[in-house]
Image (tube, grey):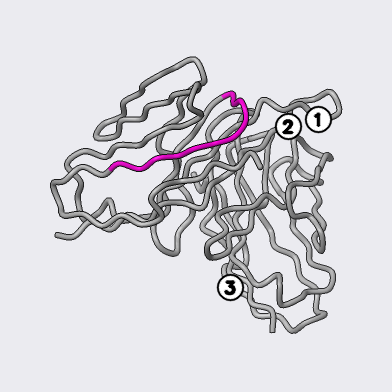
Amino acid sequence: NAGVTQTPKFRVLKTGQSMTLLCAQDMNHEYMYWYRQDPGMGLRLIHYSVGEGTTAKGEVPDGYNVSRLKKQNFLLGLESAAPSQTSVYFCASSKGRTGELFFGEGSRLTVL
Amino acid sequence: SQQGEEDPQALSIQEGENATMNCSYKTSINNLQWYRQNSGRGLVHLILIRSNEREKHSGRLRVTLDTSKKSSSLLITASRAADTASYFCATDSRRWDRGSTLGRLYFGRGTQLTVWP
């Protein structure tokens, strides 16, 4: 039982390049989330999904897009990367709206 | 902001001592959760306390919640070097948006706990 798996774990981009982070969960959870973690800022919610085919904006959605075509996958896209998007990105999932979140191990992104 | 705020930002203690971390928040909540993050790893859920509960225990962890003061505390008893990590509180807001409850938690900035052998 893998839980929440994020790929890739590390990536270096040049300004203006695009990329997609993949999150996969095998717990049949309805809710999935993308957070970013920056030093001194804690975790900030980027986008989230309450079910297959649905997505919603979180606290810091600008510059990111997401898709949830399959229940087990939640993709985070950067269309034109900027240095301000250098961060550690965490995917999480939960069974219900108010329950425990299960986190992936993180994806460290550096934008030069 | 709904965000919980942990206090202190950093805590350094010796093995065997107790560690207490506090969390304050601003608006009404459904529940409050505590998470732990080891360096370079993802967050791991520790304990959830609902708004109608005042205290909860799990092993060496004791969590209290005071909704009148909008605060919570996490106590780790008889700490060990392996408890060294960052600890975050996360609040689940009661807020409604466009007629539906939002499925999201708001995290604080965390307390960095160091336990020396």
Tell me: residue B103, above or below residue A63: above
Q: Amino acid at mark 3?
A: Phe
Q: Badge 2 sits on which subunit?
A: B
State the mark number for residue B97: 1
Q: Badge 3 sits on which subunit?
A: A
Q: Which residues are the magenta region? A: B20-30
Main secondary structure type of the part rendered in magenta: strand
The picture places residue B94, in percent across and down from the top left corner, at: 67, 25
- Give the residue displayed 54% in from the left and 26% down from the top: B31
Quarter residue B117 falls in: bottom left
- Classify residue A67 as left or right of residue B20: right
Tell me: residue A87, above or below residue B89: below
Residue B22, magenta (yes or no): yes
Label 2, label 3: how many angstroms apart (C-alpha)? 30 Å
The picture places residue B110, in percent across and down from the top left corner, at: 46, 51
Given residues B19 and B46, the one toward you in this image is B19
State the mark number for residue B102: 2
From the image, state whether disc 2 or disc 3 is nearer to you: 2
Label 3 crowd (10 A; few <14 / some 14-19 / many >=20): few
Hey, which residue is sitting farthest front in the picture?
Answer: B69
Given residues A83 and B29, the one toward you in this image is B29
Asked if marks 3 and 1 fall on the same chain, the answer is no
Secondary element type, mark 2 = loop
Secondary element type, mark 3 = strand
- Give the residue displayed 58% in from the left and 53% down from the top: A43
Q: Quadrant of the C terminus of chain A?
A: bottom right
The mark that comes first in sequence, 1 or 2, is 1
Q: Do callouts 1 and 2 mark residues in contact (Cβ within 8 Å)?
A: yes
Residue linked to disc 3? A10
Q: In this figure, what is the number of numbered marks?
A: 3
Q: Do callouts 2 and 3 mark residues in contact (Cβ within 8 Å)?
A: no
Tell me: residue B88, above or below residue B117: above
